Amino acid sequence: MYLSKTPFVMYKMSFLFVFAYVFCMIEEIKPNLFAFYSPNLGSNSYLLIGQRTVLVDASSENNSHDLLNAFASIGFTAGEIDAVLFTHGHADHFSGAKPFEGIEFKMHKLDADYVNNKDVMYTASHLVGSKYFPKISEFLEPGGTIEFEPFNLEVLHTPGHTQGSVCFFDHKQKLLFSGDLLFKGSVGRWDLPSGNKEQLINSLNSIKNLDFEILLPGHGILVKEQQQGNIEAALKVLSGVFI
Ligand SMILES: [Zn+2]
Ligand SMILES: [Zn+2]
């Protein structure tokens, strides 16, 4: 009997394709720090492996499967994550947290109250098309630090995109997780509920003098150089002066 090898070759090719697809979504930024880049409508998610294993943002519900596959590709399972820190209360950052239910979920209280009340409009769940709302178990304290060697994240309250937006600053590792405050050459929207352009400008000014080498934004690519120039460019976007 003749057996074609085609199905096996196709199986192998599809495996390679899936591997390559997942591989493109996750990047090792430095030892113990990985970035997951969203393939669909959803935020980036960052995996920090130290004394505890922590996620900064969890992307959106429709990215859950890809997020777990990406972690599996580097040998991690959902059960190994100890906590998720959310930069703010928008569904593109929190609705992918469902596989991690039962662990610590932390967010600033000003946004967390709306997430816990399942407020579809405030959280922009209607724009993301997600249904899942995590139960925020702890509130992030502005000025407080979350330590899990080698990481030491300072919580900076940076309202403007939402009233409860925060950044996480690691001064030793020179990292800034900026959520939707700041991207490469741009800023987050201020026209959603509790958004405020003046606060956004103040928040950008408040991070201007921080000493960080890598900006890890909520969306898009990392910024690895000229941080001050990037902030200045963002401020110019807000003042309507384009360069
Ligand atoms: Zn976002
Ligand atoms: Zn947002």
Image (cartoon, rainbow, N blue to C red):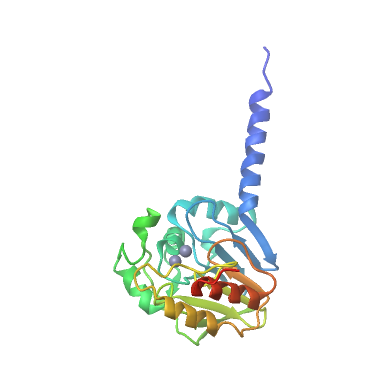
Looking at the rendered image, the quarter that the N terminus falls into is: top right
Q: Is residue 195 left or right of residue 182?
A: left
The residue located at (61%, 42%) in the rendering is 18
Residue lying farthest to the top in this orientation? 1
Toward the viewer: 144 or 157?
A: 157
Any part of residue 38 in sight: yes
Looking at the rendered image, the quarter that the C terminus falls into is: bottom right
Any part of residue 132 in sight: no
Q: Is residue 224 left or right of residue 84?
A: right
* Vertical position of residue 94 compared to residue 2: above or below: below
The residue located at (36%, 78%) in the rendering is 110
Residue 31: image x %, image y %? 70, 68
Residue 49: image x %, image y %? 62, 69
* Vertical position of residue 65 compared to residue 47: above or below: above
Quadrant of the picture in which ligand 2 is shown: bottom left
- Quarter of the rendering containing residue 92: bottom left
User: How many marks are shown on the rendered structure?
Assistant: 0
Residue 62: image x %, image y %? 45, 51
* Vertical position of residue 196 compared to residue 42: above or below: below
- Quarter of the rendering containing residue 35: bottom right
